[in-house]
Every structure is written in structure tokens, then in C-alpha cells.
Image (tube, rainbow, N blue to C red):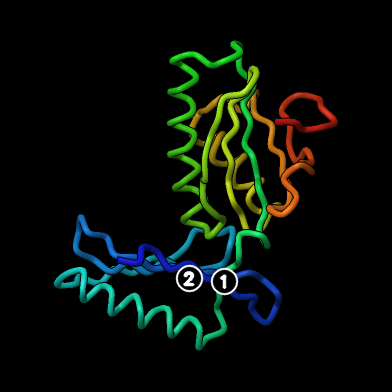
Amino acid sequence: MSGIVRVYKRDDEGALQFREAWFDEDYSQFVMNFGAVGHQSKTEETDVADAAAAEGLLDAFAAQCAEDGYAEIPAEEQFWVVAQFALKSREGTDRDRYLEQKAKDALISHLAWRGLGTVERSEFTDYKLNIFCLCPDVNKAVNAIKVCIRGEDLDFTKLSIGAAPHSDPDRYRLKHSAKPASSFSL
């Protein structure tokens, strides 16, 4: 099974649109998710007999998307957007590991249903928890992360967000800070 097909296209007004599809083995359904990047998507599910049938639908979906002008955005054309939480300890505590899992789970879902990217990894560094997201649109991703963290009652007062081009990960710029700050560092 080839996993997920995720493609993008700019519409006539220049707004980024997305389409994605995958086979949900738990429910034996072919799932299509689509809409404007940054907005809650629409979803359609189709019951399928088995993985082979889903693979055929996935191939047809990919072909139709290509015909409609949609294409994958290569990672090197996307951006790293990092949600960073200030911690009280250097390595993080059990409570911080719970925060890490809760924040990652919330961001995975929130970003995905809006076509805003994927959570790639997380790490604890000196007094910080960093959650790395690969995103096609920096500003919309930053706004979505702020909404998500607030909505999940995660510690918004400890949140900073930095972004850098995928191809230049040493050039992070501060995009949001709950506390006065002028720079962002990992």
C-alpha cells in the first residue's frame, strides 16, 4: 500500500488548495480529504472490499489530481515550523513528555485536516521541547498552531514558534512568542 497521496494546487485567485487520499484499514474505507489550505477540510469516505480495491482507487485519485493540475510540493520547497515550549528542567520531566505527546497528537490532527503539513519529529534540548512541522504555508501554519495549542489547553504562555525554509534550517526566524523575544533558537 503506497500510504497517502497529498497534492496541492493554486486556484485562479492564487489560494493554495489541497487534496489527499488514503486507505483506512480499520474501517476498510478509501478516504478523500480536500479543501483550501488553512481551513477545515471536507472528507468523503467510500467502503472498499480490500486493500487491492483501495490501491486501485488511490491510483485513480492520483491520476485525476495530476490531470486537474495538482502536484506534490517537494520538501525542499516547504518550511520548517517549530512549536517550542519553554521547560523548567534541562532534559524534561514525565509531565513534559506527556505535554510532548499531547501536543504532537493535537498538531498532527489539526494541521492534517487543514492541509497545513505534517509533524515530523520532536526533541528535548536545553530547557526546551521542540516539535518540528513540515508545512507548505508558514503564516497559516503559525496561526493554526497557536489556535491548536490554545484549544487543547496546552501551556500557551510557554509557546514560541519559529520558521525556516526547509533548504536553510539554520535560518530560523521568530514568528510568535508568548513572552517578549526578538529571536528564535533551537
Label number found at residue 73? none
Q: Residues within 10 Å of mark 2 (few under 14, many from 20)?
A: many
Number of dots carrying numbers: 2
- Residue drawn 61% across and 54% down? 135
In front here: 50 or 48?
50
Q: Secondary structure at mark 1?
A: strand
Percent position (x, y) of residue 120?
A: 52, 45
Kindly identify which residue carries mark 2: 19
The residue labelled by disc 1 is: 8
Check contact, mark 1 vs mark 2: CB within 8 A: yes
* Residue sitting nearer the eye, 27 or 40: 27
| Residue 17 locus on image (x, y percent) | 57, 71
Check the picture and name the quadrant holding the N terminus. Answer: bottom left
If the image is split into quadrants, where does the C terminus sit? Answer: top right
Residue extending farthest top: 89
What's the CA distance linking mark 1 and mark 2? 6 Å
Q: Residue furthest left?
A: 49
Give the left or right position of residue 158, taking residue 6 as reference. right
Instruction: Identify the secondary structure beneath mark 2.
Output: strand
Instruction: Name the residue type under label 1.
Output: Tyr
Answer with left or right where residue 83 lies relative to residue 1.
Answer: right
Among numbered discs 1 and 2, the one appearing first in the sequence? 1
Kindly indicate the quadrant of the structure image that contains residue 132.
top right
**Residue 50 location, x and y as percent?**
16, 70
Residue drawn 55% across the image and 30% down it: 123
Residue 139 vs 74, above or below: the answer is above
Q: Residue 16, relative to residue 85: is it above or below?
A: below
Residue appearing at x 46%, y 40% in the figure:
106
Q: Nearer the viewer, residue 149 or 23?
A: 23
Tell me the amino acid under the disc marked 2. Arg
Q: Is residue 127 above or below residue 174?
A: above
